Amino acid sequence: MSIKRTDIPAEEIEKQLAICTEVRQRYEGKKPLALVDTFGCQQNEEDSEKIRGYLAEMGFEMTEDEFKADIIVLNTCAVREHAEMRVFGNLGALTHPKKENPNQIIAVCGCMVQQEHVVDKIKKSFRHVDLVFGPDELWRFPELIYTVMTKRKRVFAPGSGDGCVAEGVPHLRADKVKAWLSIMNGCNNFCTYCIVPYTRFRERSRQPEEIVKEARELVAQGYKEITLLGQNVNSYGRDLDCGITFAQLIRMINSIEGDFVIRFMTSHPKDANSELFTAMRDCEKCEKHLHLPLQSGSDRILKAMNRHYDTEKYLALVDKVRETVPDIVLTTDIIVGFPNETDEDFEGTMSVIEKVRFDAMFTFIYSKRLGTPAAEMSDPFTREEKQVHFDRLLEAQNRISEEKHREYIGKIVRALIDGKDREEGVLSARTSGGRLVRVISDESLIGTFANVKITDCNTWALRGEIV
Ligand code: 5AD
Ligand code: SF4
């Protein structure tokens, strides 16, 4: 497969930063405000931090109020139809603030706008949108905004498919404890249901030294948790001639001095291997959590999904990781109702989840994505039939998750206190395996590691006391 990759020269990013200064001057004497709303995955969250980084360079402060914002950016997700409908709903509602403030700039970016039919719809039906740009064009956001401001015309810049890699784009991170670190972008796997290979193009890994440099900076800034992000982190480095695998990258980051932990997502079962599991075992900073999307427990469906593994291989992998890292917490993604998924196929999924007993699971009803091979597959089953399967799966998983959580009661675990819980006076913390623990404590402990005695639980979270 040809790898399309365009490394953006450092001078180009400097040019963008110079444009930021020009924008800042245009707002001289005012305190401009920006709102960036993010849909979808962590990769999008990380992209939004870059958009906010550029906006901060332009002198913007952030707001949550769409009526006060001078610039609104919606960073969108195309993975399922539901997310797209929400974006269109939100976009429609933005006609009101725009009417009150005609100088307001509304931008839409992210995976959705990498689809031609979406861009056409925005062009025709959402005329209050001033700027559209794909994930690959993010590095030149300042230039695009500047064109909208100075020319007062609508700008459409969906990506060209060249697969850009840009270093040096500033970040504005909202969280002070946990940081995302994108190590690669794009996907080569073409699972037949998935739109991502079409919206984020082919895999491009960042150079290991750039990643390690960013990790060092994050540790120096006091971040306690670094999550390495990629669509399939286990194929990290394959497109570079650097000889560094993902497992080696973990080891390199693990050797950075400091009190912090490493997480990563997502791992594809076809590429997860012993080298990774041993690195997880050996690296004291690497948290013992593996998110390993199964998608289906039917070999027939896995083949139709183009996943390149069967249930036997998946179960062997689970055995292997449990043998190597005995306290590993396993989570997964399941799609229910892939085209033509029969009762028998679904029973296969039920059987695998009972065998593995995942700690937690993200379940989705299959959503048809235009342009993917699965969208062309016939499907005699109705949404109602799929919902019955979905509900059964969820019920089984909720039971298993709660049983797994019960096993923690009475134990003392190390957890990172990462913020305030919704409940007054309660803080949220994460165990090494990524399980949520609610603890009663004062805010001064946010950003520290604590030993927590687990006293209670439900399906979704543990409750504990600091010891
Ligand atoms: N329909 C439903 N779920 C999907 N996912 C990806 N594409 C689709 C789709 N078309 C799910 C997969 C993936 C997770 C991020 O989203 O389970 O692992
Ligand atoms: Fe989509 Fe499959 Fe790539 Fe994940 S590995 S982003 S599910 S194509």
Image (cartoon, rainbow, N blue to C red):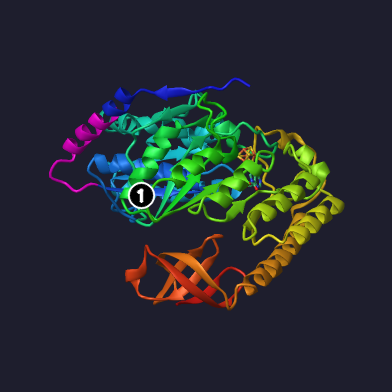
Residue span colored magenta:
16-32
* SS at circle 1: helix
Q: Residue furthest left?
A: 29
Residue 137 sits above or below residue 172 on the image: above
Residue closer to the observer: 334 or 83: 334
- The amino acid on which the numbered mark 1 sits, given as a three-letter code, is Val
Looking at the picture, how far across and down is residue 289, in whole percent?
Answer: 58, 55
Q: Residue furthest top?
A: 2
In this picture, residue 339 sits left or right of residue 216: right
Instruction: Indicate the quadrant of ligand 2 in the picture.
Output: top right
Q: Residue at x 53, y 48 (%)?
A: 264
- Judge whether residue 23 is colored magenta: yes
Question: Label 1: which residue?
Answer: 219
303 or 370, nearer to the observer? 303
Q: Which quarter shows the N terminus?
A: top right
Asked whether residue 18 is drawn in magenta, I would say yes
Image quadrant assignment for residue 192: top right
Residue 107 percent coordinates (x, y): 39, 39
Query: Would you call the spot at circle 1 few (<14 residues within 10 Å), some (14-19), or many (20 or more)?
Result: many
Residue sticking out furthest to the right: 344
Of residues 272 and 442, the one nearer the viewer is 272
Residue at 39 percent of width and 56 percent of height: 259
Left or right of 82? Residue 140 is left
Indicate the position of residue 366 as horizontal and vertical percent values. 69, 48
Residue at left offset 44%, top offset 38%: 109
Residue 92 visible, this orientation: no
Q: Is residue 466 above or below residue 120?
A: below
Q: Main secondary structure of the magenta part?
A: helix
